[in-house]
Each structure stands twice: as C-alpha cells, then as structure tokens.
Image: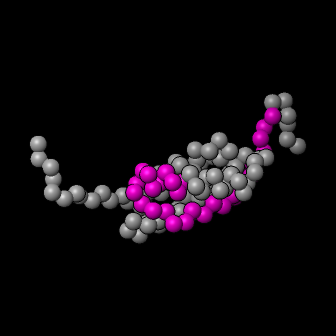
C-alpha cells in the first residue's frame, strides 16, 4: 500500500455550490417552494444569498437566523468552503392552510 506524498485538490463549481446551498435552504419545514439562491465563491471563501417563501405564521427573524446558521455550517462541512455571509430575504409569506378553512 502506498501513501501519496501530497494531497490533491478538489474544486467545486459555483453552480454545484449554489445547488448545495439551495438544497440546504429548503430543508426547513417552514420554507415552501424552491428557494432562489445565488452564491459567489472566491478560493476557500463564499457568500450566499437566499430568497425564500415561508409559511406564515412563523417567527421570521428566528427562522432566518436558524436557516442562515444551518446553511453556513453545512456548506462548510460538505464543501470545506468557509461561508462568510448568508443573506436571507423572505420574499413571500404563504398562509398555512387549515382543513375546512377557505381563504377569501
């Protein structure tokens, strides 16, 4: 068995990084629909912007903080890229539908 003398490098395209971030942003039960995510990666540092539709009522500031931390932490674990900034923009509030309740 030979042990390599040096490690190679792994490169993750911006598109792949963005798709991973998109999946992570959609994992919260309060997020509805597919998030629109943009990301810029420069070396081993990234910034992410997420436009989300969330189910209402939900504590939007706490929800945004939770999603922000989840995306930042998991992107680092999955890609090795440090995410300096995760902007969360709630672009739509979707009312929760209750059985037998019709919206006017």
Q: Is residue 72 magenta?
A: yes
Query: Is residue 62 positioned above or below 85 on the image?
Result: above
Residue at x 65%, y 47% (from the top left corner): 31
| Direction bottom: furthest residue | 42
Residue at x 54%, y 54% (from the top left corner): 71
Left or right, 44 with reference to 9: right
Give the total number of marks visible in the rendering: 0
> How is this picture coloured?
one colour
Front residue (pair 100, 78): 78
Residue at x 60%, y 56% (from the top left corner): 68
Front residue (pair 38, 11): 11
Left or right, 100 with reference to 78: right
| Direction top: furthest residue | 100
Q: Tell me if I can see residue 39 in this picture.
A: no
Residue at x 71%, y 54% (from the top left corner): 62
Left or right, 4 with reference to 71: left
Q: Position of residue 104 (x, y in %)?
A: 88, 43
Q: Is residue 28 magenta?
A: no
Q: Tell me if I can see residue 34 in this picture.
A: yes
Q: Position of residue 35 (x, y in %)?
A: 59, 52
Front residue (pair 39, 1): 1
Q: Which residues are magenta?
A: 71-98
Q: Position of residue 33 (x, y in %)?
A: 63, 46
| Direction right: furthest residue | 104
| Direction left: furthest residue | 1
For the N terminus, which image quadrant? top left
Query: Is residue 99 positioned above or below 86 on the image?
Result: above
């Amino acid at each position: 068995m030979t042990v390599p003398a040096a490690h190679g490098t792994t490169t993750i395209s911006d598109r792949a990084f963005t798709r991973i971030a998109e999946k992570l942003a959609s994992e919260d039960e309060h997020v509805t629909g597919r998030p629109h995510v943009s990301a810029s990666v420069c070396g081993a540092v990234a910034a992410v912007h997420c436009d989300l539709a969330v189910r209402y009522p939900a504590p939007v500031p706490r929800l945004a903080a939770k999603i922000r931390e989840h995306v930042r932490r998991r992107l680092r674990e999955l890609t090795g890229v440090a995410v300096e900034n995760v902007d969360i923009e709630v672009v739509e509030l979707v009312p929760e539908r209750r059985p037998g309740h019709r919206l006017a």
